[in-house]
Image (cartoon, rainbow, N blue to C red):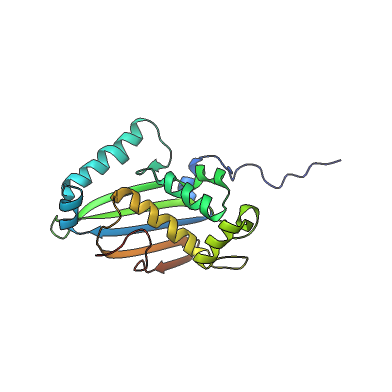
Amino acid sequence: MDAIRILGNYCSDKKPPAVNWIDGRGKSVVCEAIIHENVIKSVLKANAVVLVELNILKNLTGSVMVGVLGGFSAHANNNVSAIYIASGQDLAQNIESFHCITMMETVNEGRDPQVSVRMSSIEVATVGGDTQLASQLACLNLLGVKGSNKLTLHCYKCITQYALKSIKQCNHLILHSKKIMSLVGDDTYHLDLCDATCCSES
């Protein structure tokens, strides 16, 4: 009897490998936003320069010092896990899908911070496993991706929105520049975030 191996574990399923951080697996997504100066001052009691410096020292330098692989963010894995549980995903895939880097820079003459989140290997499914449970199926149906042959970009959109929310630390920031890009092979998708559920404009 011969054992036929379909995978050689190079896909590094459910492990945090460098190859997925570099080449991506599933979907690679970029989400960015510009946050108004008045919101930064009134809600976070800070300014754009302070936030940019904090991101460099904590999310980037701090992560490098401890040898983190793919975790240059403000706990994106919490948000990935929440979406995965709600939509019936394989929760063990969290260890790959949380790969995230948060970048910040000042724009508009240094008044506003522009925040960019890149997640290189988000893995989601709309059929099989716990996606058939009643609550999880209802969540997928709410997103409009229930069943096979459905566009799953909505799932990636939700995950990156919540990842972006985690660095904002509040749920009522005013965004005046919003876009999301999903880069997969030669395909590029641009989705409008005006209907984002992770933040309410006021």
Indicate whether 93 appears above or below 141.
Answer: above
Q: Residue furthest top?
A: 66
Q: Position of residue 31 (x, y in %)?
A: 36, 58
Indicate whether 87 appears above or below 15.
Answer: below
Indicate whether 21 appears above or below 191.
Answer: above
Indicate whether 110 appears above or below 98.
Answer: below
Q: Position of residue 6 (x, y in %)?
A: 71, 47
The residue lying at 44 percent from left, 66 percent from top is: 188
Give whichever of 120, 166 is nearer the camera. 166
Q: Is residue 125 left or right of residue 159?
A: right
Q: Do we see residue 125 in this rendering?
A: no
Q: Residue furthest right?
A: 1
Q: Quadrant of residue 2?
A: top right
Q: Position of residue 189 (x, y in %)?
A: 44, 67
Image quarter hosting the C terminus: bottom left
Q: Is residue 158 left or right of residue 60?
A: right
Q: Quadrant of residue 147?
A: bottom right
Q: Position of residue 51 (x, y in %)?
A: 21, 46
